[in-house]
Image (cartoon, rainbow, N blue to C red):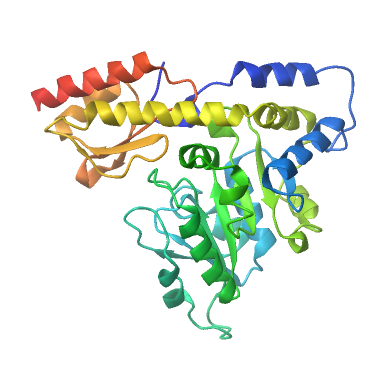
Amino acid sequence: MRSFASDNHSGVPAEVLAAIAEANVDHAIAYGEDPWTARAEQCFRDQLGEQARAFLVFNGTAANVLALRAACREWEGVICSETAHLNTSEGGAPERIAGVKLRTVPTPDGKLRPEQIDPLLLGIGDEHSAQMRLVSVTQATELGTLYSVAELQALTDHAHELGLLVHLDGARLGNAAAALGLPLRALTTDAGIDLVSFGGTKLGLLGAEAVVLLRPDLAPDFRFLRMQGGQLASKSRFLAAQFIALFEGDLWLALASHANAMAARLADGVRALPALEITQAVESNAVFARLPQAAIAPLQAQWPFYVWHEPSDEVRWVCSWDTTPDEVDALVAAISAQCSRA
């Protein structure tokens, strides 16, 4: 099967599998006290700055929930976009496990603006109201769009002026940095972000994500939160080895750049079709489009993808690190054929 439904559907790059195999020698001290974990933590410091403290975890939901727990107490809350993964796709975990209130903002392009924060700062000091503590942004957004450095900086500056921290859900942070031609640090540390959920899975890693704390005062107790949250890997070297492979030699950049290029190829191939409308700017590795309803099911039978918004027949195609030009061209041909019949 070859899929355009999600970059979670892709396999694992050969370089990452080789790194896992290389780590699979002899014995190593458990629970992160091994040389691979120390080296991976240094990789994060090299990428995001010496103040960065990285904690490896197994999946993105845990990374997000633990980041919220690190920043918020249980009577506090988080401001995010209506389309944020925190709000739509975490099964209520932020509320149930982190114990925080989510206050959401409509964002047609998935991006929060500074002026949208203030109206949600309700009931400050009132025990009947959740106290807002954190702003969470997603880069790239769930709609495939990107914050510029200036947009991120304006948002973090405003949040900090209001006494709020800023979390970045970076499930596709690599795709964003590659698309903008910027180092990872430029979209995180240098832009004023306080803590990051760093996505490895969508770049091809095997059950390896990270919470990266960019404020030293958030880090001392995080190891207890990770343990309590069931996310401390006993054989941490196998997670760490994957991040080493990702960062040393800039494999992340090659993988993300390829996925982005395939999405651009797909968008260019379907943009002129009269029965199809691209609904979001194609800025990373996803294409959102409105299709004739009759075309959707036959196309899904050939090339799995998600219907993003059923009432408007909006679909999402996501390209992965291993999507090939031939696969994109075959999907374009299939879309063209189905749209011509609609």
Q: Between residues 136 and 47, which one lies in front from this camera angle? A: 47
192 vs 211: above or below: below
Q: Quadrant of residue 192?
A: bottom right
Q: Between residues 101 and 203, which one lies in front from this camera angle? A: 203
Residue pushed farthest bottom?
126
299 vs 189: above or below: above
Q: Residue at x 41, y 56 (%)?
A: 111
Q: Position of residue 275 (x, y in %)?
A: 12, 33
Quarter containing the C terminus: top left
Mark yes or no: residue 234 visible.
Answer: no
Left or right, residue 32 beside residue 63 = right
Q: Between residues 7 and 324, which one lies in front from this camera angle? A: 324
Q: Residue at x 73, y 50 (%)?
A: 52
Left or right, residue 95 beside residue 103 = right
Q: Residue at x 77, y 50 (%)?
A: 50
Q: Quadrant of residue 2?
A: top left
Q: Position of residue 232 (x, y in %)?
A: 76, 42
Quarter containing the N terminus: top left
117 vs 179: above or below: below
Q: Residue at x 73, y 21 (%)?
A: 20
Left or right, residue 185 beside residue 239 = left
Q: Position of residue 5 (x, y in %)?
A: 39, 30
